Amino acid sequence: MADQLRIVVGSDDAGYDYKEVLKKDLQGDERVSEVTDVGVDADGDTAYPHIAVAAARLIRDGKADRALLVCGTGLGVAISANKVPGIRAVTAHDGFSVERAVLSNNAQVLCFGQRVVGIELARRLAREWLGYTFDTSSASAAKVDAITAYEDDGADGERSLEDAEREAADSDVA
C-alpha cells in the first residue's frame, strides 16, 4: 500500500486499557506502517496534557501523520493537542463525526473517552478513521485554511472577518 499512515497513540491512566487494544489493532492494519506509543505504560501516571502534546508535536514535526489519543472523556487530550500550532484534534464518539473530522476539518488527531464509549465502538471508529483522507481541493479546504490563518495571527488572535473572508476567497482562486 503506497500511502500507509504513521500513527501515534497515547493515553493517560484513565485511557490506558483502550489505548493498548487500539494500538494492537493499528499494528495489525495494513494501512498503517508505524505505530509510536508516547505513553503511558501500565503503571504510568503522566498527566494527559503531556501525552497529548508529545503526540501532537510528532505530527507537527513531520514524524507522524495522525494520532489516536484516549483519556477518560477524550476532551482533555483534545484540548491539549490543540495547543500545538498546526494541529486539529477532535473528540468523536460516532461514525459521522469521525468522518467529518477528517473530510471537513482535516483533523489529524482523534480522541476517545474510555469512560464514554464502548471498546468495540472505539475499535470500529478507529478502523473507519484510517479510511478517510482530506481532499485539499474540496470546498472544505478554504475553511481549514481560514482556521490556520487565525492560528497564524499569533497570541493576540486579532483578525477581522473581512480579512478572513478575503483570504479564503483568494485561496479559492489559487
Image: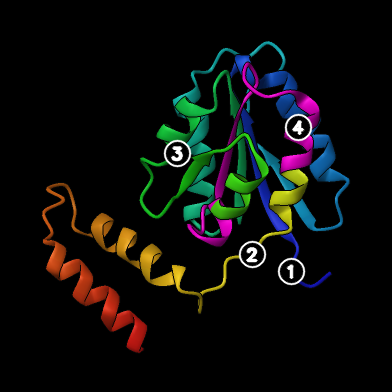
What stretch of residues is rendered in magenta?
101-125
Residue labelled with disc 2: 133
Amino acid type, label 4 = Leu
Question: Upstream in the sequence, badge 3 or badge 1?
Answer: 1
Q: How far across and down, in percent of the image, does residue 168 sit?
A: 29, 74
Relative to 113, say whether 26 is above or below. below
Q: Nearer the viewer, mark 3 or mark 2?
A: 2
- Label 1: few (<14), some or many (≥20) within 10 Å? few
Question: Upstream in the sequence, badge 4 or badge 2?
Answer: 4
Amino acid type, label 3 = Ala
| Distance Cα–Cα, label 4 vs label 2 | 21 Å
| Distance Cα–Cα, label 2 vs label 1 | 10 Å
Residue name at image x 79 percent, y 44 percent: 26
Residue labelled with disc 4: 121
Q: Nearer the viewer, mark 4 or mark 1?
A: 4
- Label 3: few (<14), some or many (≥20) within 10 Å? many
Q: Which mark is residue 81?
A: 3
Q: Which mark is residue 3?
A: 1
Most foreground residue, 89 or 54: 89
